[in-house]
Image (cartoon, rainbow, N blue to C red):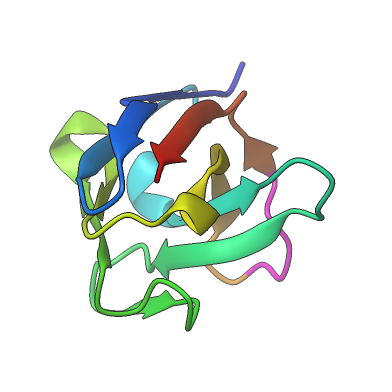
Amino acid sequence: QVQLVESGGGLVQAGGSLRLSCVASGLTFSWYNMGWFRQAPGKEREFVATIRWRSDSTSYADSVKGRFTVSRDNARNTVYLEMNSLKPEDTAVYYCAARLRDALNYDYWGQGTQVTVSS
Protein backbone atom coordinates (compact mmCIF):
# COMPACT_ATOMS: atom_id res chain seq x y z
CA GLN A 1 0.00 0.00 0.00
CA VAL A 2 1.48 3.28 -1.11
CA GLN A 3 1.49 6.14 1.37
CA LEU A 4 2.73 9.70 1.06
CA VAL A 5 2.76 11.60 4.34
CA GLU A 6 3.42 15.33 4.40
CA SER A 7 4.54 17.28 7.44
CA GLY A 8 6.04 20.63 8.34
CA GLY A 9 3.12 22.91 7.68
CA GLY A 10 2.01 25.58 10.11
CA LEU A 11 1.40 29.25 10.73
CA VAL A 12 4.14 31.69 9.81
CA GLN A 13 4.39 35.44 9.33
CA ALA A 14 4.95 36.95 5.92
CA GLY A 15 8.63 36.85 5.05
CA GLY A 16 9.19 33.73 7.09
CA SER A 17 10.19 30.23 6.09
CA LEU A 18 8.92 26.69 6.35
CA ARG A 19 10.26 23.33 5.25
CA LEU A 20 7.78 20.70 4.18
CA SER A 21 8.65 17.02 4.09
CA CYS A 22 6.92 14.14 2.38
CA VAL A 23 7.84 10.58 3.30
CA ALA A 24 6.88 7.86 0.85
CA SER A 25 6.34 4.18 1.57
CA GLY A 26 5.11 1.19 -0.37
CA LEU A 27 6.84 2.15 -3.60
CA THR A 28 10.32 2.22 -5.10
CA PHE A 29 10.87 5.89 -4.38
CA SER A 30 13.85 6.33 -6.68
CA TRP A 31 11.70 5.37 -9.67
CA TYR A 32 9.30 8.26 -9.13
CA ASN A 33 9.28 11.90 -10.06
CA MET A 34 7.93 13.85 -7.10
CA GLY A 35 5.77 16.92 -7.19
CA TRP A 36 4.37 19.50 -4.83
CA PHE A 37 0.97 21.04 -5.41
CA ARG A 38 -1.21 23.38 -3.39
CA GLN A 39 -4.85 24.30 -3.09
CA ALA A 40 -6.09 27.51 -1.54
CA PRO A 41 -9.68 27.91 -0.32
CA GLY A 42 -12.06 28.38 -3.22
CA LYS A 43 -9.34 27.76 -5.80
CA GLU A 44 -8.25 24.84 -7.91
CA ARG A 45 -5.22 22.80 -7.05
CA GLU A 46 -2.11 24.18 -8.71
CA PHE A 47 1.37 22.96 -9.47
CA VAL A 48 4.17 24.26 -7.25
CA ALA A 49 7.34 22.30 -7.99
CA THR A 50 8.66 19.00 -9.21
CA ILE A 51 11.90 17.04 -9.06
CA ARG A 52 12.85 14.20 -11.36
CA TRP A 53 13.55 10.72 -10.10
CA ARG A 54 17.28 11.18 -10.73
CA SER A 55 17.31 14.60 -9.03
CA ASP A 56 18.83 15.97 -12.23
CA SER A 57 16.04 18.38 -12.98
CA THR A 58 13.60 20.57 -11.11
CA SER A 59 10.90 22.95 -12.22
CA TYR A 60 8.80 25.53 -10.44
CA ALA A 61 5.67 27.56 -10.87
CA ASP A 62 6.48 31.17 -11.73
CA SER A 63 4.80 32.31 -8.52
CA VAL A 64 7.35 30.49 -6.33
CA LYS A 65 10.47 30.61 -8.48
CA GLY A 66 13.41 32.00 -6.52
CA ARG A 67 11.66 31.50 -3.18
CA PHE A 68 10.97 27.75 -3.02
CA THR A 69 13.41 24.88 -3.45
CA VAL A 70 12.49 21.24 -4.01
CA SER A 71 14.93 18.48 -3.12
CA ARG A 72 14.87 14.77 -2.35
CA ASP A 73 16.75 12.15 -0.40
CA ASN A 74 16.23 8.79 -2.05
CA ALA A 75 17.90 7.00 0.86
CA ARG A 76 15.20 8.38 3.15
CA ASN A 77 12.32 8.10 0.66
CA THR A 78 11.68 11.77 1.30
CA VAL A 79 11.04 14.86 -0.78
CA TYR A 80 11.33 18.35 0.67
CA LEU A 81 10.00 21.77 -0.16
CA GLU A 82 11.96 24.63 1.34
CA MET A 83 9.81 27.74 1.31
CA ASN A 84 11.34 31.16 1.94
CA SER A 85 10.06 34.73 1.77
CA LEU A 86 6.56 33.44 2.27
CA LYS A 87 3.63 35.60 1.26
CA PRO A 88 -0.01 35.53 2.38
CA GLU A 89 -0.92 34.28 -1.09
CA ASP A 90 1.12 31.13 -0.39
CA THR A 91 -1.54 30.10 2.13
CA ALA A 92 -2.91 26.73 1.03
CA VAL A 93 -2.97 23.03 1.71
CA TYR A 94 0.21 21.59 0.23
CA TYR A 95 0.24 18.13 -1.25
CA CYS A 96 3.04 15.92 -2.45
CA ALA A 97 2.49 13.50 -5.30
CA ALA A 98 4.39 10.71 -7.05
CA ARG A 99 4.60 10.08 -10.78
CA LEU A 100 6.36 7.04 -12.22
CA ARG A 101 9.32 8.28 -14.23
CA ASP A 102 7.86 8.03 -17.76
CA ALA A 103 4.22 8.47 -16.85
CA LEU A 104 2.15 11.51 -17.68
CA ASN A 105 -0.05 11.56 -14.59
CA TYR A 106 0.58 11.50 -10.88
CA ASP A 107 -0.36 8.13 -9.43
CA TYR A 108 -0.26 8.80 -5.72
CA TRP A 109 -1.10 11.74 -3.49
CA GLY A 110 -0.60 12.62 0.13
CA GLN A 111 -3.26 13.91 2.49
CA GLY A 112 -1.84 17.44 2.56
CA THR A 113 -0.42 19.81 5.14
CA GLN A 114 -1.77 23.27 5.88
CA VAL A 115 0.44 26.31 5.39
CA THR A 116 -0.91 29.63 6.63
CA VAL A 117 0.99 32.87 6.08
CA SER A 118 -0.19 35.86 8.06
CA SER A 119 0.34 39.43 6.90
Q: Position of residue 20 (x, y in %)?
A: 31, 36
Number of numbered tags placed on the structure image: 0
Q: Position of residue 92 (x, y in %)?
A: 58, 42
Q: Quadrant of residue 104?
A: bottom right
Residue located farthest toward the top when viewing the structure as drawn: 1
User: Residue sitting at 22 percent across and 54 percent down?
Assistant: 15
Residue at image position (31%, 26%) is 8
The image shows residue 110, relative to residue 44, as above or below, that is: above
Q: Main secondary structure of the magenta part?
A: loop
Q: Residue furthest front?
A: 119
- Quarter of the image for the N terminus: give it: top right
Q: Where does residue 94 sit, x and y in percent of width and height?
A: 53, 40
Magenta region: 103-107
- Using the rendered view, name the quadrant where residue 44 is placed: bottom right
Left or right, 18 with reference to 35: left
Please give left or right for residue 57 compared with residue 110 in the image. left
In the displayed structure, 57 sits above or below 51; it is: below
Of residues 82 and 103, the one nearer the viewer is 82
Could one spot residue 22 in this view of the protein? Answer: no
Residue 96 magenta-highlighted: no
- 105 within the magenta span: yes
Asked whether the viewer can see residue 6, the reply is: yes
Residue in the picture at 44% in, 65% down? 50
- The residue under the point 41% across, 40% down is 117
Instruction: Pick whichever, 42 or 46, lies toward us.
Output: 42
